[in-house]
Image (tube, rainbow, N blue to C red):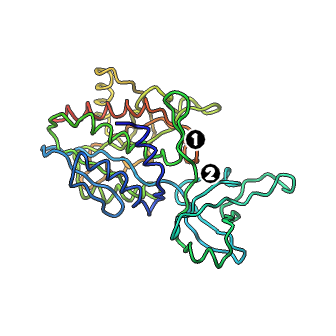
Amino acid sequence: MDINNVLKALCSEGGVSGNEKAAAEVALSYLKKYDENAFIKNNSVFATIGNGEKKVLLDAHIDRIGFIVTHITEDGFLKVAPCGGIDKRFLPALQLIIHGKKDIAGTVVSIPPHLASDNKPLDFDEAYIDTGYSKEELEKIVSLGDNVSFCSPFAELLGTRVSASALDDRSGVAVILYALELLSKENINCTLQILFSSEEEVGERGAATGAFSFNPDIAIAVDVSFAYASGEKEEKCGKMGKGAMIGIAPSLDRELSNELINIAREKNIPYQIEVMNGRTGTNADRFAINREGALSSTISIPLKYMHTPVEVVDTRDIISCAELIAEFVKGVK
């Protein structure tokens, strides 16, 4: 599997929370190789592989952060509100794609520094998107409630690093697809459930409904977490290229996390520990309290510049996460 090509295809789609269908269809096209009966429901992607007694759920969320159109001004500017956690500090001059009846480009209005009275960050209700269209032209293309995503092309950086928007969490989708490729010639003894879940960025909603449908015994949320960058606290971050981040938290099952650590050690798979002191902020929190509860853990990819248009991951970490998942699944009885 060419990880870069898969990431590029996944990250090239919109799929802002609540409108994930286009991204879900790309993920489904890859997933069909492993389960021809895979399907999309409520913008989440579902697949089942094997028929063992124990049910193991692998999840990565398919949605991305973005905006929703709230108003078209008389001057032909768009007003938007955030879908998910967006840092308002980078709003000025941000390039965007408006997903209306057709995709059109836009940019957040930026006052030249020569004319600005201060350098305070814009609030979301102060941000205007300029598309070049008049109000009358825009109303033929854009409707209130349409989604807006970052315009940020996939880029291969030095070595094994890549940059794009939506690597949170399309890189998690790539991990699971790669793990399935590693398992494709194995006889697994469990029922493997795959969920590419919708609406994680607005409350882990797809995880809640997906887990209720699957009712797994074990659930692993594959997501991204903070990779160390200059000026950040090292104890709160992972290191890029150092392998899968295995979660330990009160909301996770400690025995499952320890089992993942032991597998990584035995199989010489690069890994690092991520300690959280409460909820994880991932879909694992939902899985742990689904119905009677599933044994849950997190495996995360270190990612720089989270929730920006220029997220960065190292594909070596994607491989480490996938190898760890594959080895774990092979050992489930």
Quadrant where the N terminus is found in the figure: top left
- Going by the image, does 119 lie left or right of 255? right
What's the CA distance linking mark 1 and mark 2? Answer: 11 Å
Q: Nearer the viewer, residue 278 or 134?
A: 134
Can you give x and y, in whole percent of width and height, for residue 284 in the image?
Answer: 36, 46
- Going by the image, does 123 lie left or right of 30? right
Q: Amino acid at mark 1?
A: Tyr
Q: Mark 1 = which residue?
A: 305
Quadrant where the C terminus is found in the figure: top left
- Going by the image, does 198 lie left or right of 190? right
Residue neighbourhood size for the residue with mark 1, other residues' Cα within 10 Å, grouped as few (<14), some (14–19), many (≥20): some
For residue 87, which numbered disc appears in the image?
A: 2
Total of numbered circles in the picture? 2
178 is higher (above) or lower (below) than 239: below
Can you give x and y, in whole percent of width and height, for residue 190 in the image?
Answer: 16, 41
Residue neighbourhood size for the residue with mark 2, other residues' Cα within 10 Å, grouped as few (<14), some (14–19), many (≥20): some
Q: Amino acid at mark 2?
A: Asp
- Which type of secondary structure does the marked residue at label 2 adopt? loop
Q: Nearer the viewer, residue 183 or 278?
A: 183
Can you give x and y, in whole percent of width and height, for residue 199 in the image?
Answer: 42, 58
Snapshot quadrant of residue 150: bottom right
For residue 64, which numbered disc appears in the image?
A: none
Can you give x and y, in whole percent of width and height, for residue 119 in the image?
Answer: 79, 51
Circle nearer the N terminus (1, 2): 2
78 is higher (above) or lower (below) than 179: below
The residue depicted at 51 percent of the width and 37 percent of the height is 303
- Which type of secondary structure does the marked residue at label 1 adopt? loop
Decide: marks 1, 2 in contact (CB < 8 A)?
Answer: no
